[in-house]
Image (cartoon, grey):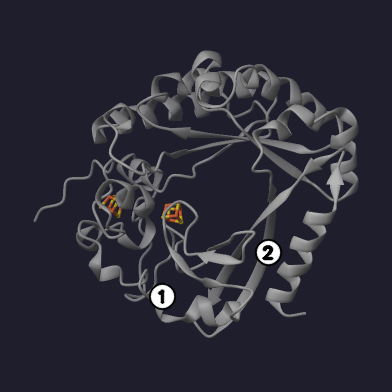
Amino acid sequence: MRLSQFLKTVWICAETQSVNHISILPVATRYYTADSGTSWNCLIIITLVSLYLEILFYLTDEVCKKLKDYGCERYQLSIDGLRKTHDAMRKKGSFDTTIEKLKCLHNAGIRSAIMTTVSGVNAEELPGIIDLVVENKVNVFAFARYAPTSIEKSTHLEPEQYRSLLEVCWQKFEQYKDSGTSFNLKDHLWTLFLHEKGLFRIPENLKDDVMYEGCNCSNCHLTILPTGDVYACRRFESNIGNVFNENLDDIFTGEKMDAFRDYDKFKKCNFCELKRFCRGCPAVAYGYTGNFYGIDPQCWKQIAS
Ligand code: SF4
Ligand code: SF4
């Protein structure tokens, strides 16, 4: 089956099915791994996401059991602050409901993941969130930085402030390493952090033209929206085609995607020894500067110019 046909099938299924009257809209994300740039190994991860915030409130034991029967292995929920902050950002009562629904997921045998989007608004609450997820036996915890759509002072974090935050989180992760909660170091600035601590070493005999790790945009990552629109990355305006009109492989290897593969254009990362392992989050840089290749506003590394 062609990839686009497969996606159409998923979309139609999601449109016509409901779980206890919950409408589920799919956002499909495909991850590719290039093998020497000539062939593809393909792992498909499809995330069903409701655009209706209320979906959380319908996650009962019965619904979770059905989700498990449908093959759902892992379910991600968001916590964006402690009670007051989270409820102000999301919906009144949603903090307590999120904690309550973790039990429904666990009872059904579904692994839970909690994701926090960090900014200047909630950064101080992050250590408390880590305590909370461990206390509630969450299986996986991760956080990513807020990618602003405009420069809002209240959301900004200074680079050194962000580094200090990673230090506090690292201490927590160490404290909880045997707790049963896994901590996903999602932000690529963790690579810088670990490199400074001597816990990440740049391997020897690297090929000059290979991006080994770091930002996945354009090397092993795509986002496909329910409309079929394909984005290089879902976190910023990066429409590169539509899967219902074009072959996905053509989109992935096409000129629009190539626009995000011009690695020498990175204003700061291009001069950094960690370029092939980090590149920060260009979506955050885009949010600040309108330039995908702009300087990551939270990168604290000093680069001699
Ligand atoms: S300059 Fe770029 S590659 Fe280097 S540490 Fe900062 S974000 Fe990462
Ligand atoms: S731009 Fe940021 S969010 Fe998008 S793939 Fe790269 S690191 Fe991830």
- Whether residue 267 is situated above or below residue 301 in the rendered picture: below
Q: Residue at x 35, y 66 (%)?
A: 204
Label 1 is placed on what type of residue? Answer: Lys
Sooner in the amino-acid sequence: mark 2 or mark 1: 2
Q: Residues within 10 Å of mark 2 (few under 14, many from 20)?
A: few
Task: Give the side of residue 204 with respect to residue 13, left or right.
Answer: left
State the image quarter where residue 66 is shown.
top right
Q: Residues within 10 Å of mark 1 (few under 14, many from 20)?
A: some
Q: Which residue is mark 1?
A: 256
Q: Return the residue nearer the eye: 70 or 194.
A: 70
Q: Is residue 277 at all visible to an observer of this figure?
A: yes
Residue 107 location (% of width, % of height): 85, 29
SS of the residue under disc 1 = helix
Q: Quadrant of ligand 2?
A: bottom left
Farthest residue in the left direction? 305
Task: Give the side of residue 227 with respect to residue 8, left or right.
Answer: left
Q: Residue at x 70, y 25 (%)?
A: 137
Q: Return the residue nearer the eye: 186 or 170.
A: 186
Q: Which residue is mark 2?
A: 44
How many angstroms separate mark 2 from mark 1 (CA)?
22 Å
- Whether residue 251 is situated above or below residue 199 in the rendered picture: below
SS of the residue under disc 2 = strand
